[in-house]
Amino acid sequence: MATSVDTHPSMLLAPLERGERIAALDVVRGFALIGILLMNIEFFNRPTSDIGSGIPTGLSGANLVFSLFVQYFVIGKFWTMFSLLFGMGFGVMLTRAETAGRNFLVPYLRRITALAVFGALHGILVWSGDILFSYSVAALCLLVVLFGRGKFIVLAIALLGAAGLLLKLTWTYQIAGCLAYFGWMAWYLRCPQHIDVSKRSVPVFKIVTRLNMMAAAAAIAAGFLIPGLPREAKVMMPIVGSMVLLLSLLMIRYHAPVAARPWRIGVAMYVFSCLMLIGFGAGQYYFPEPVAAGAPSPAAALRSAERAKAITEHKAEMAGEVAVLTKGSYADAVAMRSTRFIAHAPGQFGFSTIIVCMFLLGLWFVRSGVIANAGAHLPLFRKLALFGLPLGIGLGLLGATIAVRAVPGTLDGHILATGLLRLGNLPACLGYVGLVVVMLHSRSPFARIAVLAPFGRMALTNYLTHSVLFTLVFYGYGLGYYGIERKWQLACVVAMLALQIPFSHWWLSRWRYGPMEWLWRAITYWQLPAMRIASAANLPLRPA
């Protein structure tokens, strides 16, 4: 592979040496990977088309206990943690590039392109529960937020809208909407408080946000005052308007300082999306459409038919997936995963609206120096653990009082419960990070959590290994143990960790990177990193 034009050792932008790594990041990454495996093991034995549907019926004893633990202590908390860590990794790479005076965008575009290819191959050839492709799309969106120019964002939105109109492609509208969302975030991050117009200082930020507030107030009033609006509009317009009004007030109050904007907009937009889901779910659950006496109205009959159709289609999709994975060939499984991957790919931009929020929060952790010098910020991490975990897990348990599983096509409160669970994922994720960092820096036996560092350094290799090995164990084209009980799934997780954690120590005592980490770095920096530790002494020094 070619190297950069300027290859002076002090200016070389290259993979991190062992001594340059942030130890806390590797430990937290290893801890997060355990949570990811605890979550994924269920969907190596259950249709991935049922992800998000809650706890299945018919469980009891140890199977129910394990499912409840994963549902409220694991699900949602660890992919958000990985998103946070991804943002931290972005921040580390960006900071090092700036320090070295080197180009950042070209290596990073290679990095996310490689991740997209890894994710596509993983999702099609191995397991359809892949999240790597989602991260690659979100990483591209993060570049739009941090570096995108307004005129190009507007042009892209216009072209996507035109393509949808002319070619009848509905997915282009979704991507255009997401680009508008990311463009708005970019405006918040990079818009100055004032601009000079004809030698006058104009408070442009306040002007725009106050226009947003006026539009939000109009939406609230319209929902209450305009007669004849559809029920969905009467419920959602006041909810959306109230959320936009509150968000605009917070933006005006907390636009400065500039350094705090990434975490503020990340947290605000994450919470905003969850509150929208909660508001919609509460509207459906607590204010259902009244049923008139006698025959239902044509609209009500249509909605009832649509719900029945949704239930039938969902059951058919799950049954088809189970049939392929238990009785079909490997070619059948690849064909099914290919179809699903193509169908779901545009939806990754919608998912990115949440992931990017976590990326920005992770970026702030690095830019502020909090994670690099974690020992000096232990009071912050203690507060995150002390308040984040009870709040986050408590919100999920509150949702459990409403619904623990979904019934497709019905208004059973699952949307409201899911919104509460997702809202709790953010403080719980931060609470877990705080707990791990505090344990790592303690003088107690809990400090031995540092044993997870090599496991975390090889996170990509270990994550992909989970999918390869467990699909061969559970699927019909392998050993065929699909659908084992939850308690035995836990035993599989324990066995995998008992093998991978020591193996990661052994591997990294001889090699500088895991196999997939080495390949990813080679593509990112367009050079072949030395693999053997013995050859590290012959390498040029890297920037601090």
Image (tube, rainbow, N blue to C red):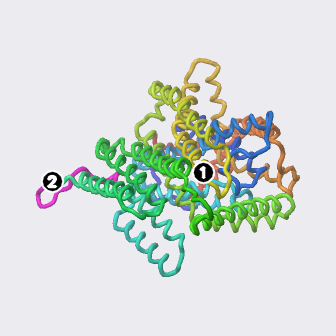
Q: How many other residues sit within 10 Å of disc 1, few (<14), some (14-19) or many (≥20)?
A: some
What are the residue bounds of the magenta stretch? 188-200
Residue 54's spot in the image, x, y percent? 68, 46
Q: How many other residues sit within 10 Å of disc 2, few (<14), some (14-19) or many (≥20)?
A: few
Q: Which residue is mark 1?
A: 529
Residue 233 picture quarter? bottom left
Which of the two labelled residues, at mark 1 and mark 2, occupies the earlier sequence position? 2
Residue under the point 67% across and 40% down: 71
Residue 183's spot in the image, x, y percent? 39, 59
Residue 354's spot in the image, x, y percent? 51, 51
Residue under the point 41% across and 41% down: 367
Above or below for 265 versus 307:
above
Q: Secondary structure at mark 1?
A: loop
The amino acid beneath tag 2 is: Ser
- Tell me the tag on residue 63: none
The amino acid beneath tag 1 is: Pro
Nearer to us: label 1 or label 2: 2
Query: What is the residue that sits farthest to the bottom in this orientation?
Result: 166
Residue 188's spot in the image, x, y percent? 34, 52
Q: Nearer the viewer, residue 274 or 10?
A: 274
Q: Which residue is mark 2?
A: 201
Alpha carbons under labels 1 and 2: distance apart: 52 Å
Q: Judge left or right: residue 235 versus residue 504.
A: left
Give yes or no for residue 198 being in the magenta stretch.
yes
Above or below for 140 versus 533:
below
Above or below for 21 versus 277:
above
Looking at the rendered image, the quarter that the N terminus falls into is bottom right
